[in-house]
């Protein structure tokens, strides 16, 4: 195999509709219209695509922010045009989901990568004193129809409630669940680890998606 053939073996797969995983960490979006992507996630594109957001002090596009009641939000860019758009984030693995009409999911704002413009989204704050102590939790509430892509550190695990999870390792949960926060009083006061606070999901229906890495960790391991 010569150099060109070797390089082409890692090239994008042409054809097909909908969100396509080129590798575990690259998402290919065949675009003919509009799509919403996380600000800063664009790696490359072909064709004629424009990006809409807000201008940064450095002159780039950082994405506009849809705010929660708390005044916090998540930066989202709108990409519009025709071509192929390639997005990724910090070598995190890409997970593609499809929502039916009226179907909803709540995703940690750090883990939203892209979603079709047909999906409605709202920014929610998980409110509680314990949640504030954990640094707060901003989630994106997405309602179909349409495809969406989220990112995880390593391979995700889907749990069925009742279950307790670390907020920093919690990626998403089904819309019918309403988590609460619990404080582990056995952990010494002053402890900064996320294990001192857990999210509690009750009931027997729905799902919770967790990842083998804490999003708030100082150093993130890159799992193969």
Image: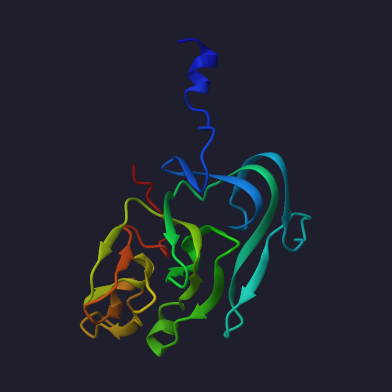
Q: Quadrant of residue 77?
A: bottom right
- At horizontal 46% and vertical 61% (from top left) the residue drawn is 111
- At horizontal 77% and vertical 61% (from top left) the residue drawn is 55
Residue 208 vertical position relative to residue 61 in the rendered view, above or below: below
Question: Can see residue 218?
Answer: no
The residue closer to the viewer here, 81 or 183, is: 81
Residue 173 vertical position relative to residue 34 in the rendered view, above or below: below
- Relative side of 21 to 154, left or right: right
Residue that sits furthest to the top in the current view: 2
Residue 143 image position (x, y, % from top left): 49, 71
Residue 81 image position (x, y, % from top left): 71, 48
Residue 10 vertical position relative to residue 30 in the rendered view, above or below: above
Q: Quadrant of the N terminus?
A: top left
The residue closer to the viewer here, 139 or 34, is: 34
- At horizontal 46% and vertical 73% (from top left) the residue drawn is 102
Q: How is the image coloured?
A: rainbow
Give the total of numbered labels: 0
Q: Quadrant of the C terminus?
A: top left
Residue 87 image position (x, y, % from top left): 56, 47
């Amino acid at each position: 195999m010569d150099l060109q053939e070797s390089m082409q073996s890692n090239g994008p797969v042409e054809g097909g509709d909908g969100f396509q995983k080129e590798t575990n960490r690259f998402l290919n979006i065949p675009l003919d219209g509009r799509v919403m992507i996380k600000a800063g996630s664009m790696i490359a594109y072909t064709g004629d695509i424009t990006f809409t957001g807000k201008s940064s002090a450095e002159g780039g596009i950082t994405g506009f922010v849809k705010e929660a009641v708390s005044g916090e939000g998540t930066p989202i860019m709108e990409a519009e045009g025709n071509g192929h758009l390639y997005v990724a984030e910090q070598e995190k693995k890409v997970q593609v989901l499809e929502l039916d009409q009226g179907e909803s999911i709540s995703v940690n704002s750090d883990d939203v990568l892209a979603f079709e413009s047909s999906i409605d989204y709202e920014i929610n704050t998980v409110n509680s004193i314990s949640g504030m102590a954990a640094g707060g939790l901003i989630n994106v509430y997405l309602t179909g129809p349409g495809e969406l892509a989220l990112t995880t550190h390593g391979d995700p695990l889907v749990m069925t409630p009742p279950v307790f999870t670390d907020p920093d390792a919690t990626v998403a949960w089904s819309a019918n669940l309403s988590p609460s926060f619990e404080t582990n009083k056995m952990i010494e006061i002053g402890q900064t680890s996320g294990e001192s606070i857990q999210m509690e999901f009750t009931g027997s229906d729905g799902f919770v998606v967790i990842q083998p890495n804490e999003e708030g960790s100082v150093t993130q391991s890159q799992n193969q």
